[in-house]
Amino acid sequence: MGQDGWRRSDAWIFVAVVMANGAGRHMRSATTRRPEGVRLADVLSMADHLRQSLPDRREVEEAVRRLTGAGLITVGDGWFRVTPAGEVLWRARPVGMGAVDSLFARLQRRPLPVDADWTLDDADHAAAILEYAGRVEPTED
């Protein structure tokens, strides 16, 4: 997969992980973030906020493989964390364009990642979607 180059979904998932961890536009210092990271439902929530759609299981799995292989995020015991290298990439993004677009442009300048060995099974993805759906308030028409 890494031989295919970076994909826009890699940037989407990376930005979702970063923002879900509390980096967002407030540009908080790394010491103010939750040290344990965030769960998949949090990543999906932020991904939905960014693009008004949820990434499918394959998009998440492939992006996480690339991002962990590149050393930009880690995933352990279900917790998604931004690495120091990911933090540097996030803080060095150009200002004036959307976060996903600017990160995608930055990723394309990086070497092709070696995919890490990480899988997301259908049941875990579905459970995270259900957890996220339980947080969303129904809108009244």
Image (cartoon, helix red, strand yellow):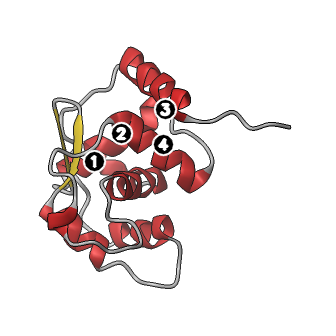
Query: Which secondary structure, mark 1?
Result: helix
Label whose residue precedes the other's in the sequence (2 or 3): 2
* Cα–Cα span, label 1 and label 2: 6 Å
The numbered mark at residue 45 is 4
The three-letter amino acid code for the residue at tag 3 is: Tyr
Q: What is the three-letter code of the residue carrying label 1?
A: Arg
Residue 28 image offset from top left, x and y in percent? 27, 72
Distance between the alpha carbons at the discs numbered 1 and 4? 20 Å
In three-dimensional space, the C-alpha distance between marks 3 and 1, rounded to whole angstroms, equals 24 Å
**Image vertical order of residue 23 relative to residue 40, above or below:** below
Q: Is residue 65 above or below residue 31?
A: above
Mark 3 crowdedness (10 Å alpha carbons): few <14, some 14-19, many ≥20: some
Q: Amino acid at mark 2?
A: Glu
Front position in the image: 64 or 20 = 20
Pointer 2 residue: 62
Seen from the viewer's position, the closer of residues 79 and 116 is 79
Q: Tag on residue 132?
A: 3
Do labels 1 and 2 touch, CB within 8 Å? yes
Provide the residue designation for mark 1. 66
Q: Is residue 10 visible?
A: yes
Disc 3, disc 4: CB below 8 Å? yes
Q: Are marks 1 and 4 in contact (CB under 8 Å)?
A: no
Q: Could you tell me which residue is drawn at 35 percent across and 72 percent down?
A: 106
